[in-house]
Image: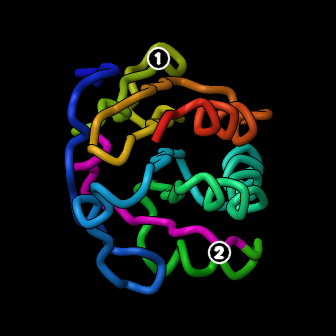
Amino acid sequence: MLLKVGEKAPTFALPDADMETVDLAKFQGNKHIVLFFYPKDGTPCCTKEVTDFSDHEEEFLRHGCLLLGVSRDDCLKHAEFRDKEGIGIELLSDTEGIVCKQYGVWQAKEVDGHKKFGVARSTFVIDRTGTIRHALYNVNYKGHALDVLRLIKELKS
């Protein structure tokens, strides 16, 4: 089930690369959130997407926005990926895929005639009230961080 603009974002608590729990609800009323889902740490496209977001973190913060990346990799893999690539943003671990399913990013794909499930690269812009302002499914990683930054700049507090 895909989420739509105007719906309340499902709240969750997931561990980050340091095994600290990040609770989405605690940011309501305080910050905009860019929640992006990506398939796997360390792959070329995912590395480019995550490092692009990380490289622009200061600009997102200036606009009252926190960046959170989510994949099904475990905390240790996230820590290795973060440290190897110099990533500054929070990477959250959804090993069970519960949050991926809540956000509709756990999707079936046809691979060599077989149905295979995986994380569809997707991004959600959530405003301070916890409302989804943009739900972007199956995005292209190229230039995506700057496209999302433009959307954040257009948000009215």
Q: Is residue 97 above or below residue 41?
A: above
Q: Farthest front residue?
A: 157
Locate residue 132, reporting x and y percent.
Answer: 34, 32
Q: Which mark is residue 6?
A: none
Color scheme of the displayed model: rainbow
Badge 1 crowding class, 10 Å Cα cut-off, few under 14, some 14 to 19, many 20 or more, is few
Locate residue 136, reporting x and y percent.
Answer: 49, 25
Residue 118 in view, yes or no: yes
| Closer to viewer: mark 1 or mark 2 | 2
Q: Say which label, 1 or 2, has the lower sequence index.
A: 2
Locate residue 69, reporting x and y percent.
Answer: 51, 56
93 in the magenta segment: yes
Q: Which residue does the image show at 53% across and 74% down from the upper left?
A: 77
Q: Which amino acid, mark 1?
A: Glu
Q: Which mark is residue 82?
A: 2
Badge 2 crowding class, 10 Å Cα cut-off, few under 14, some 14 to 19, many 20 or more, is many
Q: Residue under circle 1?
A: 110
Q: Which residue does the image show at 73% across and 43% down from the upper left?
A: 45
Q: Which amino acid, mark 2?
A: Arg
Locate residue 53, reporting x and y percent.
Answer: 69, 53
Q: Secondary structure at mark 2?
A: helix
Residue 101 in view, yes or no: no
In the foreground, 110 or 155: 155
Q: Which residue does the image show at 69% across and 82% down from the upper left?
A: 83
Q: Secondary structure at mark 1?
A: strand
91 in the magenta segment: yes
| Residue 46 shown left or right of residue 92 in the figure | right
Q: Which residue does the image show at 70% across and 47% down from the upper left?
A: 49
Query: Which stretch is magenta?
Result: 87-100
Which quadrant of the figure contains the N terminus? top left
